[in-house]
């Protein structure tokens, strides 16, 4: 399976006990199976594993929310353009930014490993870059959650919304 390339920029607060490059690659592969429009080696995604202050500033600037959040996604192409992607030239799908402190707190509250929670947030961010949006209605939210759950199941990660893998 061809998958997009996730290029990482990792703030030192994230540490090196987890192989973030491998986690990103396996997340991209599993997502591309369920969302074949992104099954191209030419697709690039910038992933920034940031600290809370950086995400707080981005959230304030781009979403007018004065607090950090777990994940932000910044698409660079419209969802309808996904069908026109080929492997002849690189295409930047967008940027995903995760906040370390928020992710750590959420993982602890959910009693899940940081790697599993970060994987879920990467999947969530990738789906946003592909045009999925849980904030447009209940039907869309349920569809996005079901897709996230299928992708995470491929990675051996339990359903973050309640069911077990």
Image: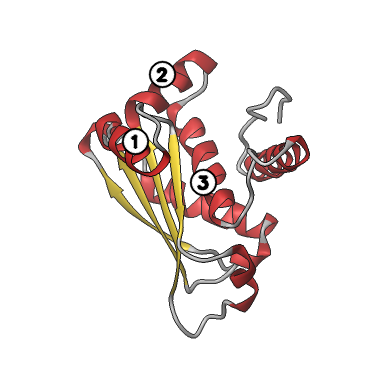
The structure residue drawn at horizontal position 65% and vertical position 45%, both measured from the top left corner, is: 151
Residue identifier under label 3: 125
Q: Residues within 10 Å of mark 1 (few under 14, many from 20)?
A: few
* Disc on the earlier residue, 3 or 2: 2
Give coordinates of residue 127: x percent, y percent. Answer: 59, 50
Q: Separation of disc 3 and disc 2 at Cα?
A: 18 Å
Residue identifier under label 1: 60
Question: Image check: 60 left or right of 77?
Answer: left
Q: Separation of disc 3 and disc 1 at Cα?
A: 18 Å
The structure residue drawn at horizontal position 63% and vertical position 28%, both measured from the top left corner, is: 160
> Residue 142 versus residue 11: which sits nearer the camera?
142
- Asked if marks 3 and 1 touch (Cβ < 8 Å), the reply is no
Q: What element does badge 3 sit on? A: helix
Residue identifier under label 2: 105
Question: Image check: 12 left or right of 65?
Answer: left
Up/down of 22 relative to 61, above or below: below
Q: Residues within 10 Å of mark 2 (few under 14, many from 20)?
A: few
Up/down of 78 relative to 150, above or below: below
Q: Separation of disc 2 and disc 1 at Cα?
A: 20 Å
Give coordinates of residue 23: x percent, y percent. Answer: 45, 46
Up/down of 75 relative to 118, above or below: below
Give coordinates of residue 118: x percent, y percent. Answer: 46, 36
The structure residue drawn at horizontal position 67% and vertical position 41%, both measured from the top left corner, is: 136
| Comparing labels 3 and 1, the label whose residue is closer to the camera | 1
Give coordinates of residue 8: x percent, y percent. Answer: 33, 52
The structure residue drawn at horizontal position 24% and vertical position 40%, both measured from the top left corner, is: 11
> Residue 164 versus residue 124: which sits nearer the camera?
124
């Amino acid at each position: 399976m061809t998958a997009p390339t996730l290029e990482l920029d990792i703030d030192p607060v994230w540490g090196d006990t987890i192989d973030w490059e491998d986690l990103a690659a396996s997340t991209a592969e599993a997502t591309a199976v369920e969302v074949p429009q992104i099954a191209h080696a030419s697709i690039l995604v910038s992933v920034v594993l940031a600290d809370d202050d950086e995400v707080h500033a981005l959230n304030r600037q781009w979403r007018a929310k004065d607090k950090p959040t777990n994940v932000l996604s910044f698409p660079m192409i419209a969802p309808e353009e996904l069908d026109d992607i080929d492997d002849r030239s690189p295409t930047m799908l967008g940027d995903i930014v995760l906040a370390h402190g928020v992710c750590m707190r959420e993982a602890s509250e959910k009693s899940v490993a940081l790697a599993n929670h970060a994987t879920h947030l990467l999947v969530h961010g990738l789906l946003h870059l592909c045009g999925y949006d849980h904030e447009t209605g209940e039907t869309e939210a349920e569809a996005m959650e079901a897709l996230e759950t299928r992708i995470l199941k491929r990675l051996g990660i339990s359903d973050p919304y309640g069911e077990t893998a």
